[in-house]
Amino acid sequence: MGSVVEVRSPVDVAQLRARLGDADVVQFQEPLAEAEYRSVAALLGDHPMVPLRVYGFDDDLATLRFLRWFPHVRRFSVAGLWHLTDLAPLDQLSAGVEFLDIGEIRKPLDLAPVAQFRRLRRLRIVEHRRGLTELLHANPRLRDLSLWRLPVDHILPVIALPHLQALALTLGSLTNSEWLAQLPTLRYLALRRVRKLNDLTPVTQLPALQWLWLETLTVERLLDFGSNTMLTRAECLGLRHLGHPTALQGLAAAPQLRELVVAAPYLPVDALVPFVDHPTLERAEIVLGSQQCDRDADYLLRLPPPHPDTQFAAMHELTRIL
């Protein structure tokens, strides 16, 4: 697993070079000297897959003037750069940018300047809605999309991303779940605390789905996943409305399910009976309402815990996004 590399002045170039090979992200929250910007940019040039993140409350960083030293950065994040007011300075980046994270900022911004980038493969957007339709239209080859705190089907009634493989919806709302049927290429789907989402029928009809993550939804029972012939891992976390002994029966119908994670405080142990002697299930982690229930569940299934997220993703060539 990689690490977060925090850059501070004075920059130790040798130490930074040694840490970059195992980095998930390189980030800083205070301005650097010009020579330090040059050094960091040169090192990132040797590691184009490592994202650069700039965050914090510094007004000078919020102008994005420092980007003149990073024209070749391919992965860039401004999540948590609170005083950022304009995305137009992103034009200092090259047209080859493939990942952008326009994350948490004090006020939602207009995404129109970002639509200049037409080679994006991964995109994360938090709250910003103006220009989102145009941005997605400009990037039809997008593979990974994460949307936070947005009324998804209200602002994007039609979505055409024929190559999308990973989608994460967090907070916000999805009134019409049929919206998901527009994305049959999905291999990874995370639905986390999405309001108004009560019907998962379209999810059971996604033919390529391999990894499903459901978190803090109001669903009371999972439907029949027998048609999800590729589904390998399912995570049901914080589903407090699952309380009936048959609540998971539909999920047990997934014919290739190998890993299962369940955290549901009101789910009875009997709800796990459909997974006993499941023909493909190999690993499971169950957290119920008490330690005794957890022990009973472990005794019932007698399976080792699932692989760590990053390992499972690597094993199946999947992208886990939040």
Image (cartoon, rainbow, N blue to C red):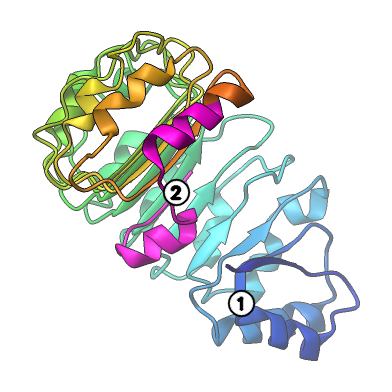
Q: Can residue 130 be seen here?
A: no
* Residue 170: % across, % down: 47, 30
The quadrant holding residue 99 is bottom left
Q: Give the residue type that dot 1 points to.
A: Asp
Q: Is residue 315 magenta?
A: yes
Residue 22: assigned label: 1
> For residue 152: magenta?
no
Indicate the position of residue 185 as horizontal and vertical percent values: 16, 47
> Is 131 or 202 nearer to us in this picture?
202
Callout 1: SS? loop
Vertical placement of 44 versus 93: above or below?
below
Q: Residue visible at 12% across and 31% down?
A: 205
Residue 25, placed above or below residue 135: below
> Can you see residue 139?
yes
Q: Is residue 152 above or below residue 285?
A: above
Left or right: residue 151 versus residue 49 is left
Quick one: label 2 or label 1, which is nearer the N terminus? 1
Give x and y (percent) for residue 175.
Answer: 31, 12
Q: Which residues are magenta?
A: 294-322
Looking at the picture, which amino acid does disc 2 mark?
Ile
The N terminus: image quadrant: bottom right
